[in-house]
Amino acid sequence: MPEARPEADRKAPLPLLVAVTMTGTVALHIFVPALAAAAADLGTTAAAAQATITVYLVGLAGGQLLYGPLSDRYGRRPVLIGGLALYLAGLLLAIPATNIGLLLVARVLQSLGACGSLVIGRAMVRDVSTREDAAKKLAILTTAMTLTPALAPAIGGVVSGAFGWRAVFVVLAGIVAGLGALVVFTLPETNRHKVALPGAAAILSGYLRLVRVPAFRAYLVAGACGGTSLYAFLAVAPFLLVDRLGRSAQEVGFDCLIVVFGMVGGAVLASRLAARVPIRRAARGGNLLCIVSALALLAIDRTGMLTVVTLIAPLFVYAVGVGLLSPNAVAGLMNVDPHAAGSASSLYGFTQMSFGAVFTAAATAWPATSAAPVALALLAAGLIAALALRRA
């Protein structure tokens, strides 16, 4: 007998929940094409401007560990509204920023608010879904999340090229404000079973119990390496493409769009192979694509053959590999203990963004005059993932 449809399902439209979740990473990707312009306008270095990506990833990582327990205790709606308000405050602070220090503070606030949308949006989708349609709704959500990093850089490139880098935050502030208004006036509370807020020791114990399982550790590390290693390229792209290869801000956005669409192709391939290929084998196949394409990019750079085409082509293949690796790694770690799926999801989100910050910092530690730092960061991610998958 089909499970009764939750009462909140009739009042919590899926498109709004998808939009809430997508906003969690929009601010990360939409600002990428404007990095070079912001650095020049603020009179700072490329490395300092690239730090706006790193600190955003750090904020996303840490915040995801907190929003889940808070929304379980106090409800999804008030915690989500608070997160959106913090997100909007960070965007408004960034618009008049006159130095890189203030911009970095604004980016931290943005990330701490945005990760609430990321975590709670997923939770609300689960709240309003029956067992029969949960998989379908989460598949829609996953597809939308894959499109976010593909579309946001192109939009950011157009906006910053036409109106300047500050306009990116103006546009995003309008989107977040409008979305917040919809949440306040139309979205009901979906958490019908609030629980006591667990202590820090209990939360940590749950995470440690998962990490002690070898298969969970393997898929956690492999998925985190694949899921955010491309951020190393996104942080360097504006400087490498503009300063080295002579591209405009608008073209940078579309170049990033091409690369990230490789992830969409990989995700589609992963869904097609899901019923026929074991999770571990599909993950290893995707990771092999990552390693080969990173090696190809390194060889292209070292032989002096770097052009826009020879840069984007191997990165596109790498993105296809990521799109195949990441969903299978997530499926593998979520299958370890279905009763701890929420903790597994939070821990994965934290680890993923933490690894992304490390790879981004590594790639931006050198001047963006060659693709070698990016290639080495991607190669390191692929090799670490390969070692992890041997234990899966």
Image: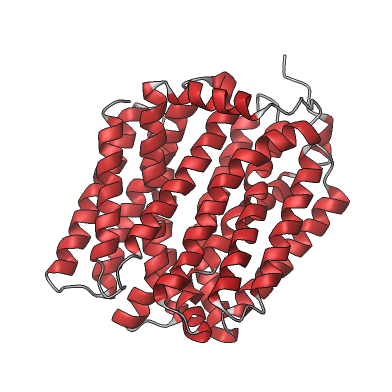
**Residue, x 34% and y 26% (percent of image)?**
278
Which quadrant of the structure image shows residue 317? bottom left
- Residue 5 location, x and y as percent? 78, 27
- Residue 196 location, x and y as percent? 76, 25
- Residue 336 location, x and y as percent? 46, 21
**Residue, x 58% and y 60% (percent of image)?**
26
Q: Is residue 269 left or right of residue 59?
A: left
Q: Is residue 228 at all visible to an observer of this figure? A: no
Q: Is residue 362 at all visible to an observer of this figure? A: yes
**Residue, x 88% and y 52% (percent of image)?**
185
Which quadrant of the structure image shows residue 163? bottom right
Q: Is residue 161 left or right of residue 116?
A: left
**Residue, x 18% and y 58% (percent of image)?**
296
The C terminus lies in quadrant: top left
The residue furthest left is 303
Q: Is residue 166 left or right of residue 231?
A: right
> Is residue 365 or residue 33 the one in the foreground?
365
The N terminus lies in quadrant: top right
In the rendered image, the vertical position of residue 365 relative to residue 199, given as above or below: below
In the rendered image, the vertical position of residue 382 relative to residue 303, given as above or below: above
Q: Is residue 386 left or right of residue 10?
A: left
Q: What count of labels does the image hold?
A: 0
> Is residue 257 or residue 167 the one in the foreground?
167
> Is residue 104 or residue 119 the one in the foreground?
104
- Residue 156 location, x and y as percent? 55, 72
